Amino acid sequence: MGDGQRMERRRAVANDRVARYERMVEIRAFEDRVQGLFAQGLVHGTTHTAQGQEAVAVGIAAAARPTDLVTCTYRGHGIGLALGMTPEVILGEIMGREIGCVGGIAGSMHLCDRELGLLPTFAIIGAGIPVAAGAALTAQVRGTDDAAIGVFGDGAANIGAFHEGLNLAAIWNLPVVFICENNQYGEYSRIDLTTPIEDLADRAASYGIPGIIVDGQDPDQTVEAVGAALAVARSGGGPTLLEMKTYRYAGHSRADKAEYRPEGEFERWYERDPINTFRARLESEGLLAAGAAEEIEQKVAARLEAALRAVEESPPATVDAMFGNIYASA
Amino acid sequence: MGDGQRMERRRAVANDRVARYERMVEIRAFEDRVQGLFAQGLVHGTTHTAQGQEAVAVGIAAAARPTDLVTCTYRGHGIGLALGMTPEVILGEIMGREIGCVGGIAGSMHLCDRELGLLPTFAIIGAGIPVAAGAALTAQVRGTDDAAIGVFGDGAANIGAFHEGLNLAAIWNLPVVFICENNQYGEYSRIDLTTPIEDLADRAASYGIPGIIVDGQDPDQTVEAVGAALAVARSGGGPTLLEMKTYRYAGHSRADKAEYRPEGEFERWYERDPINTFRARLESEGLLAAGAAEEIEQKVAARLEAALRAVEESPPATVDAMFGNIYASA
Amino acid sequence: MVRMRMNQAVAAALADEMREDPDVVVFGEDVAVAGGPFKTSDGLLEEFGPSRVRDTPISEMGFLGMAVGAAASGLRPVAEIMFIEFLGVALDMVVTEAGKFHFLSRGAFTCPMTVRASIGAGLGFGCQHSQTMENWMSHAPGLKMVMLSGPQSAYGLLRSAIRDPNPVVVLEPRALYGGRGQVTTGADGILPLGEARRVREGEAVTVVSAGAMVKVALAAAESSDDWSAEVIDLQTLIPWDRDGVVSAVRRTGRLVIVEESPYTSGWGTEIAAHVGARLFGELRAPVLRITCPDVPVPFGRELEQRYMPNPGYVTDQIDQLLATGRTPDPWWVGEGRRA
Amino acid sequence: MVRMRMNQAVAAALADEMREDPDVVVFGEDVAVAGGPFKTSDGLLEEFGPSRVRDTPISEMGFLGMAVGAAASGLRPVAEIMFIEFLGVALDMVVTEAGKFHFLSRGAFTCPMTVRASIGAGLGFGCQHSQTMENWMSHAPGLKMVMLSGPQSAYGLLRSAIRDPNPVVVLEPRALYGGRGQVTTGADGILPLGEARRVREGEAVTVVSAGAMVKVALAAAESSDDWSAEVIDLQTLIPWDRDGVVSAVRRTGRLVIVEESPYTSGWGTEIAAHVGARLFGELRAPVLRITCPDVPVPFGRELEQRYMPNPGYVTDQIDQLLATGRTPDPWWVGEGRRA
Ligand SMILES: Cc1ncc(C[n+]2csc(CCOP(=O)(O)OP(=O)(O)O)c2C)c(N)n1
Ligand SMILES: Cc1ncc(C[n+]2csc(CCOP(=O)(O)OP(=O)(O)O)c2C)c(N)n1
Ligand SMILES: [Mg+2]
Ligand SMILES: [Mg+2]
């Protein structure tokens, strides 16, 4: 799929709330499909899906420019789709095909799209945090008004790179927005087993920067919060830490059924499902007519099946790809 | 010098404020002498002295038991002396002689005394912080009421190990006291150039533990604060972060003349010199008679010269020492 | 003898050490409640309780630092690093602190900690979760390092590692966790550190391998009727069994190393250089290192398998070595790439 | 040609690159206001200002991460690691992130960052501040690594490192910073990466060395009338000049490596293993690695000097190699210790 389509997808999310809704539906369907493919044994390796966190993804994509570089984690399909990547380049990567965004040699944890501003996603916890600060340094040194966004999980807030990255960004007043996707779990451990405080946003005080709690289930609020923090960053106001409270519907990775979750927890969060509540809002605002939601779902499903066919038609990554791009030449 | 003397020195500091005063005088004289030896070119390598920070050192030594393990940094002569190590074993190490506490194969940055509770001092910034938590883990698992103490600088509060160490200690409720010797500088950089907040004690909030600012120039207050935090730790109350505000009189290391200091800064701190103010207090309380301070100074000076002679008589570290103690045998 | 998977053998070794020594404690990310991401600590929390079996926050520097402090003060901590790459955020604690603690205390402190880390390719985890990285720890006096090759090796070497008074890094090939084998447990099942193990006798060539490659070397050796190969499982990478390996190679006159890691500077490099010099004039062929190419580990089933030495390739390389008396080019050179 | 110290040559290279390319920025601990703990960035802040020359907090993981992000987005950051050991808290960023960024972006991003780190013994800094640790980075496809051996080498290689589109680690022997030499600056002074440099011609033996050992190898070569040695400064450790070294050794028939690091698994191990295999049957003597013993670097002037190869010892080892055709024992074996 050409550049044009990807940029178009990005613009849609940036400009149109209904398009955001559609993208959230796409992310949910995509992740469900990926889980299914793994369950069928059709994919090698592991994967980390982001059902339930769709509002965070579209919030970032809607508020950021393609020239604002984003770092994110192995749980990156949703953010990739939100930023405008097509289902086929992500699925292709997950399935190890040439059509994949990295040619199929990297796998689910490693997505990348330079034009859309997505740096290679990070499979080492915390690593993307200072890297985002580094991208912000480029904007600051060059005097552009671009900013950078570093996305990471609640578990990552306990690792050294978090502390060092936020401290550096603060002391240099860098144009970067740190977004903690607090989905309540790091792997199989609830946050309260690993983190002695309630709100990770409070850690911003250690660096003298604003720390703001955001309802990560509401795409209007996530767009708003990211947009405001980016505006601060662009105008020289320095970094912000946004803690987006959200919930991971699936297990941590392919093999995890999330049986450790306390009873009723999932259900409580599902009451505020970001897609359902957003649909209701759009409907009540008259932006989604009766039947429109079903149409969107069908459209998304068809799009996904087309993507899957394109991926299946694409050859597996080649031995040449394995030897390419080790060293760049001048 | 035998074990007996070291334990005796420790007991003195634990029990007697005048002995604490004397130890502070000893530390000051020792560090001045070390600087002099380097200036004369009599010592190889580098050294980091702690003039001005004497009240922190005796505060720790007076409040802790020898079975409370302490981790500290390359700037460790003062703490070593305070804990009870003799001038000759420290000077011997600095000068690379067999009499040194590590046999002269380690140098100024690496002191150690197992009986007195001093783990090998750390030359990598921050490393001692989680290691102290580990010593506290032993006490917790074994159910003793020992505690551990991790001492580090203001600059170290920006490194990842600080964040991870405090978080771990908090979540496991470990009996450990973290002591940040905020001497206002990390190498040649004033703290405000590297740290976006005023009080490092505030960082305790990120871990849900108490963070307390202590006047690091007053040995009565340091003993009190360390003692209180240790009592909390021993009784199952978990870790505390103490920020001791103090000042490094000398440059960072051997080669540094500290010319970057703003005018008048040293003088302002010297007005509250920990030794001078403590002497005045002891005199006004009638604990130091007229002339007693001079006697102490002379005694300390004589002790130091004797130590220097003992070191000079000790042979340089041997090649055998270099091959010893690489691997322990069962 | 009990039949078990390698991950069960790891858990059994941990449990037996914990039973015998109350100072043994286990911690790492998701090792307690979940029994370990690879189920290598299953059942420990239930048997030994939350004081001795603990889940940590994601903070490798922090919990390896705790291991150092705990070890120095009397415990025998076993810390799990989920994937060896994560040592990249905490290597200081292993190499620069633990490895020098005994030295820096003139012998007064020991640091009997064990760092277990899963390694290797084959499961489709991509280039940041599939390496072996043994040379991060191979140039650091004071450390020991072993690599597991199956259930018995896991049980026996891990128990020795925990008992050793020095810091020991235990590399566990992830792809072997699910493989079953007979295991002698108890004192008889303990394998000493520092000794290589001959797993097959042979005349024409000595094949030294470790970890997941032992099986590959063995399969290659068994597939040829033209020559017979002695196969050695190195077991301990640091300090390695110089005398054992040298005397084995002296017998056959030929040394082949099979490694699951890039060509440049893997563990086999040291074996090759050392043996090559010590047996100069006695070797009947150059030392052959059969390795992966110098590229990041690729994702994708076929590519990943291609990346690693496999039995057919090993046989073919040995065939060529014996036929020509020269080291054959690796497969990727045939495809126009750098050796 | 200008006479300068090696630390001045480093600063000159940085300044010249910064003049030619506004994207070059420099950061690290105390590199700006203080001009660097070893004065390797003296004058840069004054000339290029606080946006391009910055002091960092003590947070190696953080600022190397920033270097990755800055490099990927268009700058050419040069980050200083004061002592190579400090990479132990940040190695992930170099090996696992920077080294794979190009690969993981299918070539879309490059990561042209330079990591400068001082290395080595000789100044009495003790065992946590005196190592070389090159093998932390030697098994990591995607990285390049060079080692400086004097003022010209510093100027020429550092400029190439900064210009290179890949992450390059520059190892700077601390003990050489104060040494003076004539330096050709400007375009003519730039030395290419990937090429070894012959610093002396000779017939009997090829001595490959790097960093502070080049001088030692040269002094040894010059001290003997009995044999003549070719001396090679390897310059780039990864990827090293295989063809250059192999063809040099083919000429003399003998290879001696002089390294400032412990015997096991240093950079020379790879040279020894590779050349030993490639020139099997052509070598007239075993490959001799002259190294430090496998111990932590000791403090103390005499011990520390004893620890490192010196010219007299190198000469003596080569004498013995030539006389016996066998690798002589290292000095410490004579004293009853393990080889
Ligand atoms: C340094 C490091 N340690 C451990 C891991 C293994 N790991 C992968 S994901 C994960 C949990 C991360 O939790 P969180 O940051 O909350 O992100 P989430 O998966 O919930 O999106 C862990 C421990 C890793 N990848 N890197
Ligand atoms: C990981 C690491 N980075 C850098 C250094 C170099 N270094 C040694 S001391 C020092 C300053 C430390 O400042 P602070 O923590 O305030 O302690 P102080 O020296 O003032 O006692 C630095 C940067 C180091 N030893 N380790
Ligand atoms: Mg999470
Ligand atoms: Mg300080």
Image (spheres, coloured by chain):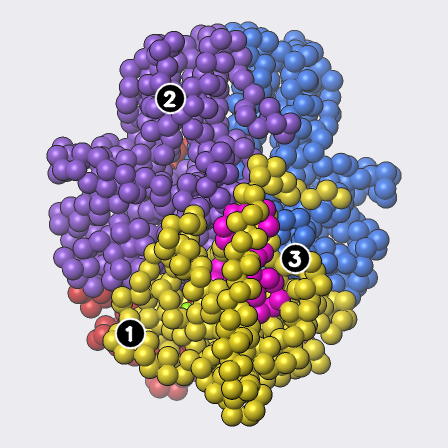
Chain colours: A red, B yellow, C blue, D purple
Q: Nearer the viewer, residue B246 or A245?
A: B246
Give x and y (percent) for residue A195.
57, 73
Q: Nearer the viewer, mark 1 or mark 3?
A: 3
Question: Label 2, on which residue?
Answer: D220
Q: Which residues are magenta?
A: B73-99
Question: Label 1, on which residue?
Answer: A238
Q: Nearer the viewer, residue D125 or A271?
A: D125
Give x and y (percent) for residue A46.
55, 51
Residue density around tag 2, few if under 14, some if 14–19, many if 20 or more, within 10 Å? many
**Residue type of the residue flagged with mark 3:** Met
Magenta-drawn stretch contains A82? no
User: Residue at horizontal 47%, vertical 67%?
Assistant: B29
**Residue type of the residue flagged with mark 2:** Ala
Magenta-drawn stretch contains B92? yes
Q: Chain of mark 1?
A: A
Give x and y (percent) for residue B81.
57, 66
Do the residues marked 3 and 2 share a common chain? no
Q: Chain of mark 2?
A: D
| C-alpha separation, residue under disc 1 versus residue under disc 3 | 57 Å
User: Residue at horizontal 60%, vertical 73%?
Assistant: B61
Question: Label 3, on which residue?
Answer: B1
